[in-house]
Image (cartoon, grey):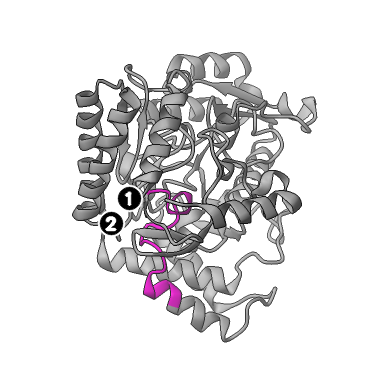
Amino acid sequence: MTHQRSHEVFTRARAVIPGGVNSPVRAYTAVGGEPVAIASGQGSRVRDVDGNAYLDYVGSWGPLILGHAPPPVIDAVRDAAALGTSFGALTAREADFAETLCRLVPCLEMVRLVNSGTEAVMSAVRLARAATGRDLVIKFDGGYHGHSDGLLATAGSGIATQGIPGTPGVPEAFAALTITIPFNDLEALRAVLHARGGAVACLIGEPVPANMGVVPPDDGYWPAALAMLRASGALLIYDEVITGFRLGLAGAQGWLGVTPDLCTLGKIIGGGLPVGAFGGRADLMRLLAPAGPVYQAGTLSGNPLAVAAGQAALRALETTNPYPRINALARQLAEGMTRAAADAGVPVVVNIMGSMLTGFFTAGPVRDFADARRADTRRYAAFFRACLEGGVMLAPSQFEAMFVSAAHTEADVAQTLEVMRAAFRKVAA
């Protein structure tokens, strides 16, 4: 493959955009080389500006569960745009969309629409602090909840990928209000709540972490954690920006059978457009202005294009129910990766939950961020580059997920595994 035009785009971008990208993990820093510049996407594939095609398992980092440019979403955006792109006023579409979210997501009695996952998390934490009158927040090592002040401590996703400190520019007083503990460690949570439980407003966590790579919760972890939080008077916030509508129409809440006090949503609910949401118990949500004293606002919140795209995506998921098929494809991919790595003599453990998975280049089980960080990132980088040259696009980071979409087919998975077998052999050589 040639990437001359991608190089030209990246060169131009570096002159006017810090690092040449608008989100750090896109820069390929962790895997070497320069990023390819994408020109278009259709179904399970993307095409770069040089004309190279790739089977895509990034899916815009999770939102594109229907694949690229699905006709129902494209048609909905086109129809909405013809009526106006933004009003900064109440619309019927917002009410329709909010009703859909509250009907499908177990914890949602009321919901507020925002513009990103970062904004949703920031607002949910503010609401939890106001509701409890407490300041401290617990999060997991390797958990990434956007780039708001105070939640970058020991973060995953791009923070882990870039290997940079998580809090430069954040006052120490802000960072000190965040307590980090290992995921899947009930004793660590118990110790924090015993020592400081009276000051803890909430625990915020991905119910299935995907920003340190995919790490399933241990059986019984979340019911036990919720019981501890209830006993201490702290709230549970599920960050379902990734898992929401990825693990099913009820998200991880439905999958795990645990209902949090609040949750945050994004990615899939925007159908590929920028949108986020947070919500939960009505008594908590009524604390938000203008109903209550907790301020939160946004000019583009409930944007008609984003809401139209999200409603179309959720409607398609309800009517077609792609989950059994895409989960089965993900299992085929995980099992094939495991066999291919073993045949090549490369230590790899594949974690999977629903239609998202991560192949960690390490021999041991991965149950938390410390386990994930033992992965051989140099081998992952070599594997990534070999797959890219073979026409398979993975996340340019060991600490992210692969996403299978409804547009992927068994033939796509077979082609992917053929490329991966060659990539594992190359890594082993």
Amino acid type, residue under disc 2 in the picture: His
Question: What secondary structure is found at the residue carrying circle 2?
Answer: loop
Magenta span: 57-74
**Labels 2 & 1 near each other (Cβ < 8 A):** yes
Q: Where is residue 387 in the image (x, y as percent from the top left)?
A: 36, 41
Name the foreground residue: 329 vs 302.
Answer: 329
Is residue 325 visible to us here? yes
Is residue 234 visible to the viewer in this orientation of the structure?
no
Q: In this view, does 307 lie above or below 102?
A: below
Label 2 packing within 10 angstroms: few (<14), some (14-19), many (20+): many
The residue that disc 1 covers is 404
Amino acid under disc 1: Val
Please name whichever residue, 343 or 320, is drawn nearer the observer in this view of the structure.
Answer: 343
Disc on res. 408? 2
Residue drawn 78% across the image and 25% down it: 172
Name the foreground residue: 76 vs 134: 76
What residue do we see at 79% from left, 26% from top?
173
Inter-mark Cα distance, 2 to 1: 7 Å
Question: Considering depth in this image, is 35 or 369 the residue closer to the camera?
Answer: 35
Picture quadrant where residue 420 is located? top left
Q: Which structural element holds mark 1?
A: loop
Q: Position of residue 241 (x, y in %)?
A: 49, 48
